Image (cartoon, rainbow, N blue to C red):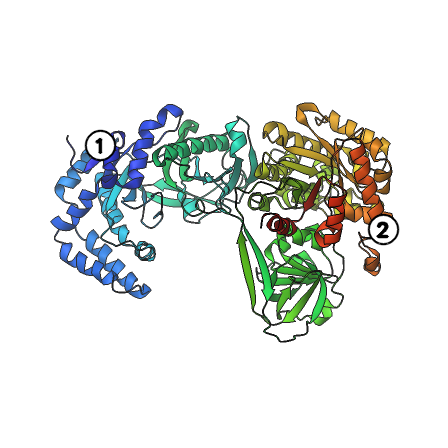
Amino acid sequence: MKYSYIIPFQTIQKADQVSVGAKNFVLGKMRQALADQGVIVPDGFALITRAYHEHIQENGLSENFDLLVHALQETNALKNIARCSDEIRELLCSAPLPKKIRTEIEVAYHALGEGAVAVRSSATLEDGLSASFAGQQESFLGVQGIDSVCEAVVKCMASMFTARAISYRNNVGVGHHDVAMSVCIQTMVKADQESSGVAFSLDPETGNQDFTMINSSYGLGQSIVSGLVSPDEFVVHRRALQKGFYPIVKKTCTDKSQKIICKDGASVSVAVGPKARYKFSITDEQVIAVANAVEIVESFYESLAGKRVPVDVEWAFGPKNQLFILQARPETVHARDTRPVYKRYKLNMEGAKIAPIVSGQAIGTHIVHGRIRKIASPDEARDLNKNDIIVTKSTDPDWMPLLRTAAAVITQHGGRTCHAAIVSRELGISALIGVHDALSALKDGQDVTIDCSKGALGNVYEGHIPFSCDSYRLDLNTKPNKRIRLNIADPDRARALARLPVAGVGLARVEFIVSNYVGMHPMAAVDPDKLDKETREQVEQLTRAYKDPKTYVVDRLSQGIGTIAAAFYPREVIVRLSDFKTNEYHGLLGGSFFEHHEENPMMGLRGASRYISDSYRLAFELECKAIKQVRNDMGLTNVIVMVPFVRTLNEARQVVEVMRENGLERGKDGLILYMMCEIPSNVLLIREFAKFFDGFSIGSNDLTQFTLAVDRDEARLAKLFDERDPAVIAMLRMAIAGAHAVNKPIGICGQAPSDFPELFKLLMDESIDTFSLNPDAALERTISSHG
């Protein structure tokens, strides 16, 4: 039969694009071009826009239709839009398809096998390169039988006038007569017993194009689009993928209690079995298959557009593990402008002198409004809101999820290097530390303004005081400052921070990954028999998506490290091995069964001493395995490993040997080993330590406390803790000179250079090789350097 209204996917040509819409055009061209590359698009056909126009004209709908469309142009009021939307759709659906159009659909549907099909919109401006109308029209899945197909076609045409589609066109300035509807009729993939999902060839949060983001769930992908389930999420590093590695740098398994399947020609929701709901919905091999297909689809779009075009892809696995690409469209939201923004804040008091309620040491440079929430422990904060300001005595790693939600944090205790201060810097939130009367002076539910924009001292003011914020966009073409690196704790911020023109990461803290990605004491995975029944059950629940707890620990560690390393690839990322103190390990799930009380954890079992100890060595082996997985399996060889708190030369010798036994051999496969220089013995014997390590990074916090014998967590001694003390300055100079004498690079990753410009200048004068700074300070230096 010669078609007048139908174009099969296999015969769609460039000249047909106006008639079939962007979606049909792309599906047809992908089916023709990509099968040889292993990308399979289900067969189908396009009902061209001529059918849409003739449905209106031949059913005598034109006059009423035009009147209603004209009414839409008179006002943008939501009430009027909703009324017109209902009337237009009812008008279009009230008449049957003209017989000649129905006949052609019937012939084409028969050629597809008369099975279940998806009926989707393909409006003429939908899924274009400059603007996306995705989601504005309706789709109908699992449609079977010619009557049902024709009914879905008419509904699809009518969906061009849903209220959301009307509002969208009004907002982007597209006339309602300027768009016409083509319809896609495509064979359904039998994914009821498999999995489906969506994938982006960039990070949709940051616009970072070095990553593919994949969401997956059981059954049809409609469960994800509709919000029925929170899907599993996978992040793949594209550069390493293109080299043949398996760089799944993040995996998140969710509770998938429901899935959508096709039943009796309709989409229905059914329960997922109790075991499957807590398992990953696709395997690692399937993740890589989807990621590779996305690469091919993006290259296809690039051939159409003549430039790189990030894409949004819908996919499904059918029987026999066959991957199908169901739809593809350009990603138009984040791909246009990915230049990072730096913000400077200023409080607008209009000359008035308003006394602060309380003051303390300022962390960060932001100004925030919020509501005071007094919280004694993380367990009390289940209803924390994003504008809440936490007020508490102090924090530890268990508080990390809350701090990520809160607008700011105020603690009564601690100094510039306490947990709350460090984490707040990493998360980019404001904090006031050491506010001794915070719990008595601030009231629960009180509205306040926190100002951390003026330097070392921050203030809390009553009420919401206006403030201004100036933003600076940084040129992505700016060459990285070779001496500036970043301190990073939270892997989830890495993809955004990686856009800054810095030389890499000077300090990635594994202990933060243990706390927030692993969430349990590593020895609980090694020796679960030591746990009580309740804790063992908690561990089993935490690790249920994985083969066993050991695999969980290794995978979660490697994902956290890999996320940071991938974000900055190929720039160097220095990963410091876990440096929890005993009391911090004790606070982890299962920690109380493996840790003993120490009078002074700062000087207790930590760093190299812990790694080689009989009580922890098996857990350290998991850490080594995770780093090996990042470098060898993910292909992220930009990871440099740094060992903290090495007290003696004998400890250095032993820890290097333990690492070698566990696959991390210095020099093999380009592995570089660094050591933290943070104890006076490190400075005094730096030339001897250099025999075991390839470079050093000064930890100014510990070096200061051990040089001056000042416990940095003791508030009564806070005034004595000063990195500018002559004894500390002498140590810094000695360390730099000693490292350079044996041709070893040395940097600094402590907070001091960020807080004290004079110390920054002194270290520059001493020719220190690198500064590893927190993001705010690094941004400041970038602006200072590049104007």
User: Which residue does the numbered mark 2 point to in the structure image?
Assistant: 726
- Total count of labels: 2
- Distance Cα–Cα, label 2 vs label 1: 88 Å
Q: Amino acid under label 2?
A: Pro
Q: Quadrant of the N terminus?
A: top left
Q: Quadrant of residue 139?
A: top left
At a point 59% along the width and 56% down the height, the residue shown is 405
Q: In this view of the protein, which residue sits in the foreground, 372 or 139?
A: 372
What number is the disc on residue 110?
A: 1
Instruction: Find residue 192 and report its horizontal and vertical position in percent.
Output: 40, 37
Mark 2: few/some/many CA within 10 Å (<14, 14-19, 20+): few
Q: Nearer the viewer, mark 2 or mark 1?
A: 2
- Sequence order check: which comes first, mark 2 or mark 1? 1
Secondary element under disc 1, as helix, strand or loop, is helix
Instruction: Find residue 773 and report its horizontal and vertical position in percent.
Output: 68, 47
Kindly check if marks 2 and 1 are in contact, taking CB atoms under 8 A apart as contact. no
Q: In this view of the protein, which residue sits in the foreground, 770 or 559?
A: 770
Mark 1: few/some/many CA within 10 Å (<14, 14-19, 20+): few
Question: Is 330 positioned to the left or the right of 510 in the image?
Answer: left
At a point 75% along the width and 61% down the height, the residue shown is 434
At a point 55% along the width and 61% down the height, the residue shown is 469
Question: Is 133 positioned to the left or the right of 776 in the image?
Answer: left
What number is the disc on residue 574?
A: none
Q: In this view of the protein, which residue sits in the foreground, 586 or 715?
A: 715
